[in-house]
Amino acid sequence: MLENYAFTHVRDEHNISSFFERTNGSISKYILQRKVIIMKRTTIIATALFLLGISLISTQAGADDAPPNYSGDFLTRSTITGDWGGTRNELAVKGVTFDMSLTQVEQGVVGGGKDSHWDYGGRGNVTVNVDTQKLGWWPGGFANLEVESNYSRGVNGNTGALMAVNSNQIYPVSNGGNNFNISQLYFAQFLSYYAGLFAGKVDTTSGDANEFAHGKGDIQFMNIALALNPVTFLITPISTLSAGVIILPTKDPDQAVVTLQVLQTNGNAKNSGFSSLHSDQLTFAEEARVRTDFFDLTGHQLLGAEYSNKTFTSLDQNLRFTIFNSDTTLAQQDNSWNVYYNFDQYLYEPNKGSGKGFGVFGRFGVSDGNPNPIKYFYSLGFGGKGVIPGRPNDRFGLGYYYMEVSNANLEIRILRNNLTVPSFLRNEFGYEAYYDIAVTPWMLLSPDLQVIRGAQKNVITLNPPSRQGVDTAIVLGARLQLLF
């Protein structure tokens, strides 16, 4: 499950094909001519990593071969810091780009939920992409580094919902408090028009791509349930070690991409993951995304499946407690799986392929239901960009999600009396509406409204003993994104 700017860059058909056209389509011929022994070793190592296991990832393809242009006056250029006296543009021509952003969120639970108050927090992101061919080294090679940090806290724990209403506060780790981590560091090597290999530490949130509902909450929807499919969360860490293959069936990444990937099931952004890499804690992910042109309008269809061989704690437990002796061994559940699907379809597209217009989207997912607490999921919505004349960079969206939650089934025996613990979770659903106002190309200001009926039924306190129901939460917020 890998889809981000770096992989869009990696799958750029023009970057890949330009070399093969100049060398009659043969990487090996180029290697023999140049006698680059290091390239041979790199390919062997990458292939060995791929043979460790495969799984599927998705893509959003079709980057322009032209490098980005950071020049311009302060109010019209793409970033605050501009072209760095021309150096940034020169590096981009050579295949080295730096993307930096800061997203700040002020958000509050103004009704219902568990606790009504406001919180401020933010997330910074630095991404570096390297194209080895443009840099003058060897063809088909791409590297990506992503560093993230979030600070302060959000209101995710105050709504009673399982789904975060502010995704920014869970990347790279949830409410970590002024953390600084490497979320992604990988290398990819294309071997032909049609296939490439990759290995390293990957940011899996770039999978499950959708034109109108995707990302980390810095643009488009802030609620994670409208950005990704939550049936994947149990066995797909945010940041983890991975190796896999990218397949371009038509050699055009804008038409179809199939990705196969094996991941470390228990990875995280705080460490490299090598010390806890085990053969019985792997996730095998498969994802394919194809472009459609229904009614001569751009759309996409995506299908993915995942399986993990890890042993999890079962949601069904029979715990036997006595006053003098207790057996608290928790039942285990072997393996977990999920299948997910999403689509996006433009309904109005004045200039095909421009990313401007509006359309609909949807996601659907199913899992084993145990150990995965999310058994079924779907979301539907409407979104667009650049619809208002004179506002080409404004975005908007309205979405709804629903998920069926698997309650833990606990049976406790105290002496001779059996007690079944009542369910403490319920099915969850929510709505979100946002509007991204492009104050300048490098500044987006977004008012946001969410109405969430969370999965948590009650808040229980011990001192004094009480049980209080959790009502539907109304969440207001404002987001400010700055591009540097």
Image (spheres, rainbow, N blue to C red):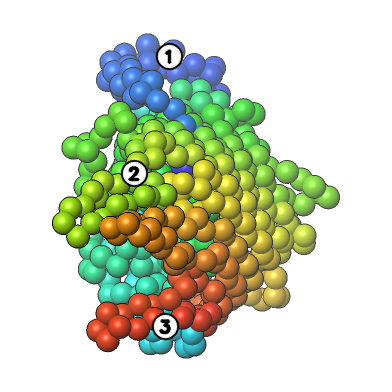
Q: Amino acid at mark 3?
A: Gln
Residue lying at the far right of the rendered structure: 295
Q: Is residue 379 among what the camera can see?
A: yes
Q: Which residue is mark 3?
A: 468
* Distance (Cα) linking label 3 and label 1: 69 Å
**Label drawn at residue 87:** none
Which residue is at 62% across, 60% downward? 379
- Work out whether 242 lies above or below 42: below
Question: Residue 475, how many percent across, how many down?
Answer: 49, 81
Instruction: Please tell me which of labels 3 and 2 falls first in the chain.
Output: 2
Q: Are marks 3 and 2 in contact (CB under 8 Å)?
A: no
Q: Is residue 80 among what the camera can see?
A: no
Q: Which residue is mark 1?
A: 28
Toward the viewer: 4 or 20? 4
Q: Which residue is mark 2?
A: 331
Question: Residue 286, how many percent across, how many down?
Answer: 52, 35
* Distance (Cα) linking label 2 and label 1: 54 Å
Toward the viewer: 100 or 52? 52
Q: Amino acid at mark 1?
A: Ser
Which residue is at 62% across, 54% downward? 363
Circle 1 crowding by C-alpha within 10 Å: few under 14, some 14–19, many from 20: some
- Work out whether 134 lies above or below 433: above
Check the picture and name the quadrant holding the C terminus: bottom left
Circle 1 sits in a helix, a strand or a loop, which is it? helix
- Work out whether 326 lies above or below 336: below
Question: Residue 384, how many percent across, how many down?
Answer: 66, 66
- Work out whether 462 lies above or below 245: below
Instruction: Please tell me which of labels 3 and 1 falls first in the chain.
Output: 1
Toward the viewer: 310 or 259? 310
Circle 3 sits in a helix, a strand or a loop, which is it? strand
Circle 3 crowding by C-alpha within 10 Å: few under 14, some 14–19, many from 20: few
